[in-house]
Image (cartoon, rainbow, N blue to C red):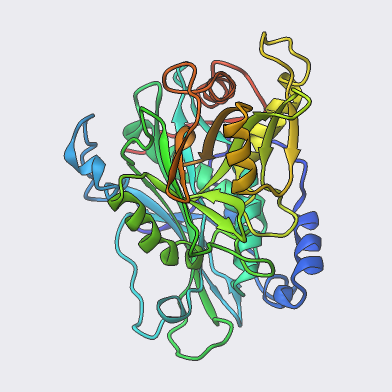
Amino acid sequence: MAPSAITPPHGTQQTSELTAAAVTEKIAQTAPGLLKNSIKTTLRPLDASRLRFTRTTTPMSVPQPGDPIIATASQCTDHMITAVWRSTTGWEDPELRPYGNLSLAPTASVLHYATECFEGMKMYRGFDGKLRLFRPDANCKRMLMSSTRIALPGFDPKELEKLIIAMIAIDGPKWLPKPGTFLYLRPTMIGSAAALGVATPKEATLFVIATFMPPLGAPQGMKLLASTDGVRAWPGGFGFAKVGANYGPSLMANGEAKARGYDQVLWLLNGQVTEAGASNFFVMWKSREGKPQLVTAPLGDKIILDGVTRRSILQLTRERLSDGRTGLEAVEIVERHFTMEDVVEAVDEGRIMEAFAAGTAYFVCPVSVIHYKDQDLQIPMSQGDSGPYAALIKSWLVDIMYGKEQHEWGIVVEEEEFY
């Protein structure tokens, strides 16, 4: 079937609190000079209304629950989105095409200089049968921040969101039919210019794929190994951006943690707690005055990722846990630097209430043990597999994602008959 121009399907769009203009202004303030590639009025912008599609002629089979291929995280859906940017012309028409390999020259920028960024999202089949995304606008804006941080081209985040919606509207009905399930979405941009040289790539490729992922988590709570001889990110670096260069160097430390019987590394910076593996980290403790506090590292020094799950947890806590009406004690949110010595002190004094990691992959995962300086610190898990605050917050998020609670964060996607 020859490619043809179409208007991509649209789901319900939500106006977010951060506009594309605000994102651009923030980049200009924090990383001057990186925007020279992102906005050029003479170049073609990314335009979802020019989406073209080619239907697959070799549709794949959908794996059933328990199929071993799910554990490999390699089974993708029938289609993917691709779009190419060139420094002389801008963005070419995006295409929805059969899933398949990309062609790259051995000299491609991404293979040598880590010019790669990505997002982690999920599409959900609600218990009401509807297909949803969770806060896709936030992911698309963050991807703009990441791409410009590594000198890849800019784009209107709303256009990327439309492309993602177009793809899942077509593949969702076949590949995600069962209520209460999800597929993982991976928007990615790479420097694909076929030339060596430490320079801004003259070509970039954007693609979006959807894949099955095995369940992640730790039924008895995540066990963390606090890193005392390595760091994940540093002030003035790129820890805030979702770029591949943040992840590859962490794999050896995570492997060492697993070899010692732990699930992830708890990353420290000069003793300060930052992230748990690739997830944001939270601790619930009581202040010395006896007030429950939800404590997490701040965003201001650009060391940790501005996680969408993190942002959602903080907002729900402010809205629903600040006055005690849930039956749990009211909680104060504290975004500040804190150290492992602070955590040790809270454990020793009996003030620690619970801890958990949060992100798209692990979702909200309770922590049961933190190993630090040859000691396993035991973290309470009063409900067997979670603390009460983490369990309640997680239930609210699940309800929004799967449609049990109607909320502006749950974006319903209108599905298309395509096969």
- Mark count: 0
* Image coordinates for residue 341, horizontal then vertical, percent: 61, 47
User: Residue at 71% across / 31% down in the picture?
Assistant: 315
Which is more toward the observer, 300 or 157?
300
Q: Is residue 179 above or below residue 235?
A: above
Q: Quadrant of the C terminus?
A: top left
Q: Left or right? Give the position of 379 relative to 328.
A: left
User: Residue at 57% across / 35% down in the picture?
Assistant: 134
Work out which residue is located at the far bottom of the displayed protein and give it. Answer: 197
* Image coordinates for residue 170, horizontal then vertical, percent: 41, 40
Q: Left or right? Give the position of 320 relative to 88.
A: right
Q: Quadrant of the N terminus?
A: bottom left
Q: Left or right? Give the position of 81 relative to 135.
A: left
* Image coordinates for residue 211, horizontal then vertical, percent: 35, 45
Q: Is residue 389 above or below residue 99?
A: above
Is residue 12 among what the camera can see?
A: no
Which is more toward the observer, 60 or 63?
63
Is residue 411 among what the camera can see?
A: yes
* Image coordinates for residue 194, horizontal then vertical, percent: 43, 85
User: Residue 416 is drawn in which quadrant?
Assistant: top left
Which is more toward the observer, 111 or 153?
111
User: Residue at 47% across / 22% down in the picture?
Assistant: 126
User: Residue 28 is drawn in which quadrant?
Assistant: bottom right
